Amino acid sequence: MHQFIDIKHHYKILSVCLLLILTILITYWQVKNFDFVNLDDLGYVAANPKVQSGLTIDGIAWAFSFTDIAYWHPMTWLSHMLDCELYGLNPMGHHWTSLQIHIANTLLLFFILQYMTKALWQSAFVAALFALHPINVESVAWVAERKNLLSTFFWMLTMLAYVHYTTRPSLYRYLLTLLLLMLGLMAKPMLVTLPFVLLLLDYWPLERLRHQSPFNLILEKIPFFALSAVSAYISSLSVHRYEIVVSMELVPMKLRVANALVSYVKYIEKTIWPKNLAVFYPFPDTLPVWQILGAGLFLASISFLVLLNLRKKPYLCIGWLWFLGTLIPVIGLKQAGLWPAMADRWAYVPLVGIFIILAWGGSDLLKKWTNKKIVSSILAMSIFLVLTTQSFHQASHWKNNITLFENAVRATDHNWLAYNDLGLALMRDGKLNDAVFHFKKALQIRPKYLTAFDNLGMTLYKLGRFEEAYNYYMEALKIDPKDAGIHNNTANVLTALGKFEEAIKHYRKAILITPDFAEPHYNLANILVIQKKFDEAVFYYESAIKNDSEYSDAHYNLGCILLRQKKIKEALTHFTEVIKINSNYKQAYNQIGIILLQRGKIKKAEIFFSKAVQIDPGYKEATNNLLFIKKMFKQYEI
């Protein structure tokens, strides 16, 4: 009889797992057709040569170093590199990996809760909420948030290893738990709060306090807290190293604390009613006093009530402290980079605490109902149907840059970043006038937003509205006269206006501010060519190549000048380098063909002219050169 019950129980577990996998696939299957998005995906994968090279020795060494893109998280870099090794730059593969990790995280959460509590349906309910809640869409559908998924995967494995350790303590199991925590911290430092969570689990549901003293349990966690401290230090070191820490002068501590209190309440609100979810929520300049006091009173009241019920209903306190505690690293008391008021992705792990409260609290509420099983089943199915529908709809916003930021503009107020990034997406899609509108909207909200000025200037430049572009760049330089990129782009506009001397001044300023910035070196060389100052132009083309060895246009233009100066061998070297960098650079093939033709190597020249024509059948110069060879030298065997 016991064996029959055991088999039945295993079938239930298997059924829950299959149902979870199926519903996740239904909800997220569409992401396999989604693009990379501009916000971080470029730096993490799509425009990162180290990652694109796959798992190389050089790449692995880079992953474990302090990069100039993000805080230290080598495991995340290795994960992206492995995807590039398997799928190249096909977004489908990268999204598929993220989806697989989310499925694994869901199943692990279910197994861990079920193993600890022996409460199958409450555990399944928590796992289903975790799997299907719309607030978790961001973590799954955004390639750059691999760090969130991967760190959570190690979070779950650490918890599983810890529970395994508590059943029969041994040094091996203890060290395994520590190792998994370390790997998780190397994926994202969000796991710094995990030792605190392990202490919570000791109280409920593991109930280790019945047999051990609090002192011993805390002592047991000291190595875990030590790892967390090291991770926090390394993360702090990395953000300070690249000077992206937001100062207290810019965002005072009083405002940070106020936003933290309000954000805690908003996370709960979005959990219960997941409406107007967006990729970015602007950090407020001020907050109404009533919101701050109301949020503080609400949080204090809930904390008091759950502590009051600690013995009778321990899951309330454990779930609540899980939520409050695990959000601390991202609640905004310390800020680096472009810090939002809150973020959906930051709730990926913390909301497990709220889900635990809902699952076990809901079960307790339904105990007195006569038709408990029927009511709970109908209620659960209704909730999951709504969540699946909402998450499917929310995931669709991540299809591409335009759909993502259009949703952000609709879902939030005064979202300067969303307007700017929507404008950028529209600009790259060729919808220049629409882009101008959105850049101007961003500047209306944030008048000193330098990036929007730059993007607006570039768009107006593309539209041929040079005077207007120049005026915006002048405004941008008033905000930051030491921005090398703005000086370079201002000079580009002046070049288009034919004001070469003024343009040269701005290019030189850009070079003076950032000597290793290749583009102004290249652009200055182009003007010097127009002015027939070829020797000076050679110097700046060489400088551009020195700062960016794969600057194909600089190699090509330098080759053309060297060819003009009869330095054939050096010119050929640079044209060959162009083809190595960009195998579809038709002009380089044509120039090599001309050199070979002049040397009498007609058959070889024909190959290069043919390649240029193959790349662009409408390329007249290469076509004429090819016809010339066929017409004049067809009868010769060279």
Image: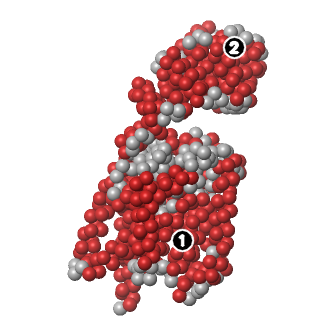
Q: Residue at x 72, y 26 (%)?
A: 512
> CA separation, marks 1 and 2?
64 Å
Residue on which disc 1 sits: 197
Question: How many other residues sit within 10 Å of disc 1, few (<14), some (14-19) or many (≥20)?
Answer: many
The answer, for residue 113, to whether it is visible in the render is no
Residue on which disc 2 sits: 528
407 lies above or below 359: above
507 left or right, relative to 120: right
Q: Nearer the viewer, mark 1 or mark 2?
A: 1
Question: Which of 283 and 517 lies nearest the eye of the viewer?
Answer: 283
The answer, for residue 23, to whether it is visible in the render is yes
Helix, strand, or loop for circle 1?
Answer: helix
Q: Tag 2: residue type? A: Leu
Quarter of the image that includes the N terminus: bottom left
Q: Residue at x 41, y 79 (%)?
A: 309
Farthest bottom residue? 1
- Count of picture labels: 2
387 lies above or below 606: below
Helix, strand, or loop for circle 2?
Answer: helix
Question: Which of 28 and 468 lies nearest the eye of the viewer?
Answer: 468
Question: How many other residues sit within 10 Å of disc 2, few (<14), some (14-19) or many (≥20)?
Answer: some
Q: Residue at x 30, y 68 (%)?
A: 380
Q: Residue at x 38, y 66 (%)?
A: 128
